[in-house]
Image (cartoon, rainbow, N blue to C red):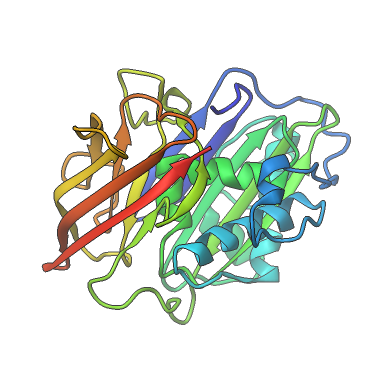
Amino acid sequence: MIVSSLRWKRWIPALLSAALLSACGGGSSDSSNAGQSTSTPAGQLVQEPGAPALSNNIATDGFNWFNYRRSQIGLSPLARNGLIDSAALGHSSYLNLNNTVAHEQVLGKPGFTGVTLGDRLAKAGYVVTSLQGEVIAGASNTSGFYLAEELVTAIYHRFVIFEPLFREGGAGAAVSGAGYAYFTTDLASNRNYGPGLPAAQIVTYPFSGQQKVAASFSSDNETPDPVPNQDVVGYPISVHANYGTPVSVTAFSVRQRGAGADLAVRLLTSGNDAHTPVSAASIIPLAPLSANTSYDVSFIGKVNGADITRSWSFSTR
């Protein structure tokens, strides 16, 4: 379950509207340690097979964790770009100095580097010619692995992180004197897209055979709320295609191994949810999953008009 001191944002212009994952609490106004970026161990995450080595740098650990998860589902890793790093670090420093979590900056406030993501990238010397996106975390936890994993869990943020056509990115973090971390990751493509997926293909998450998946997600911490009528729900399950590639759903279900019926879920598609991109879909179980349990997932639909069927399983921790 997401702790109460998290605040998140994600954005891809022309793909998704801005969303805020917010809980009670917030950053400290003490910014005396704005340059600090040392993370703490992420416990169980560090112990995952094949997990990236811990660097004790929030931005590096968070960025590497995104690439780790992308590689597990068959997406190309994001190349790290120093210019994008500069834009992301500048924004995290601005958030820290102003005790806020937001995508847009206000001219004249401390640490101002540009109103929009595009402005900040351009100031850093990076000119976007295709896609750009941003995810932001604010939390009283200074583990880059933890911050990145929580962003992957939050479904609207996951849509950004698992966009197949992003080619490169950068990350930056700042920590207040009270130990509140601001972690910004900017994703982009210029000159051309990343390799993406073959035509009419999808990737899934959790991926087939994934173990130790979280059992629950605090829906109220994400705004817009993906499940408006309740807070603690099951772990989101999703499919992703290339940007702009229509994904339609005929049937999308999850069932506990050996059970006689599918779980009750909320289905998110671009047809019923304004915050879901046309190239993705998700189901969110309406009750937390059981611990140490296997689940079977079935997806039947179309990708860019071509029929596609996927069946896979994962297990919870």
Furthest-front residue in this view:
258
Residue 285 appears in the rendering: yes
Residue at 27% over, 41% down:
254
- Location of the N terminus by quadrant is top right
Residue 109 appears in the rendering: no
Q: Is residue 211 left or right of residue 255?
A: right
Furthest-right residue in this view:
32
Q: Is residue 125 left or right of residue 263?
A: right
Q: Is residue 203 left or right of residue 66?
A: left
In front: 300, or 161? 300
Residue at 72% over, 29% down:
140
The total number of labels drawn is 0
Give x and y (percent) for residue 179: 81, 31
Give x and y (percent) for residue 220: 43, 23
Give x and y (percent) for residue 62: 66, 52
Q: Is residue 196 left or right of residue 60?
A: left
Does 120 sit above or below residue 23?
below
Residue at 55% over, 36% down:
8
Does 168 sit above or below residue 260?
below
Q: Quadrant of residue 17?
A: top left
Q: Quadrant of residue 85?
A: bottom right
In front: 6, or 258? 258
Residue at 23% over, 38% down:
267
